[in-house]
Image (spheres, rainbow, N blue to C red):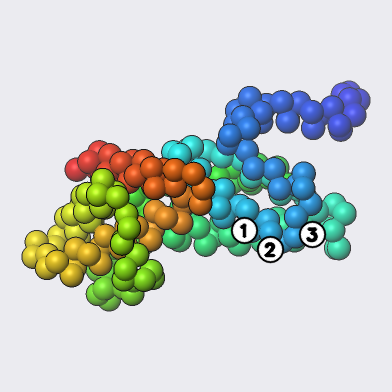
Amino acid sequence: MDRRPSGQFRSIEQAFDEARFGAERTLNLRASFPTAAEATRRADLWLRERQMAKAGEVLVITGRGAGSEGGVSVVRESVLRLLTQLRKTGVLRDWTEHTAGSFVVTLAPVTALFEAPRRTRRESGPIPVIVEPDALRGLATETLVLLRQLADRALDALGIQVRPPAMIEDEMIRQFAALSSGVHDGPDREARLRAAMRTALEEFDDHR
């Protein structure tokens, strides 16, 4: 009979997780004891950023809530709701419960960010643009060229042949809005945004 202490089992599991995911693909919410709202905000930003980095599978550690009221982790429950939402909006493909206090999340390709709006437009026509019409002002020429290419790919996927300038601009704004959510503020943000655009273009081309 194996009489090793449970802490030793946890250490072994942790070692396997570290080998499988590493620091760059692990979000440990348990370590900082955040509120449910803060955990949701951090997980949302981190998962969107990891999607842009094409991280594939990642590990989100919430804790099992042993010390929480009723033994239910409010952080775990809030993150679980977030995962459901992010699957609908194209940030992730799926997730599985890894342990009682963690999830393995499979991130979606960047182009999946455009699939939900595309389905909506097929069913009910154009959807509202969720950023200001002048959102593209001030962007570098290289960024605008990439956005235009993305808009063309997206409209190709919709089967739209006639493309008035206003339609192209609206599509560029949609692409900008979808990608911006996964690119954090900070140094070289526009360069990182262009990198995400190139990733999306590669994914569009791979599915031709």
Q: Can residue 202 be seen in this view?
A: yes
Residue linked to disc 3:
72
Q: Is residue 86 above or below residue 104?
A: below
Q: Report the amino acid beneath label 1.
A: Arg
Q: Which of marks 3 and 2 is nearer the N terminus?
A: 2
- The x, y position of residue 98, in whole percent, is 65, 42
**How many numbered marks appear?**
3
Element assignment for label 2 = helix
Which labelled disc corresponds to residue 37? 2
Question: Percent position (x, y) of residue 37?
Answer: 68, 63
Residue 26 placement, left or right of 127: right
The residue type indicated by label 2 comes to Ala
Residue type at tag 3: Val
C-alpha span from label 3 to label 1: 20 Å
Inter-mark Cα distance, 1 to 2: 6 Å
Residue positioned 45% across, 61% down in the render = 88
Q: Position of residue 108 (x, y in %)?
A: 43, 47
The local crowd at label 1, few if under 14, some if 14 to 19, many if 20 or more residues have their Cα within 10 Å, is few
Q: Which of marks 3 and 1 is nearer the N terminus?
A: 1
According to the image, label 1 marks what residue? 41
- How crowded pointer 3 is (Cα within 10 Å; few <14, some 14-19, many 20+) is rated as some
Is label 3 in a helix, a strand or a loop?
loop
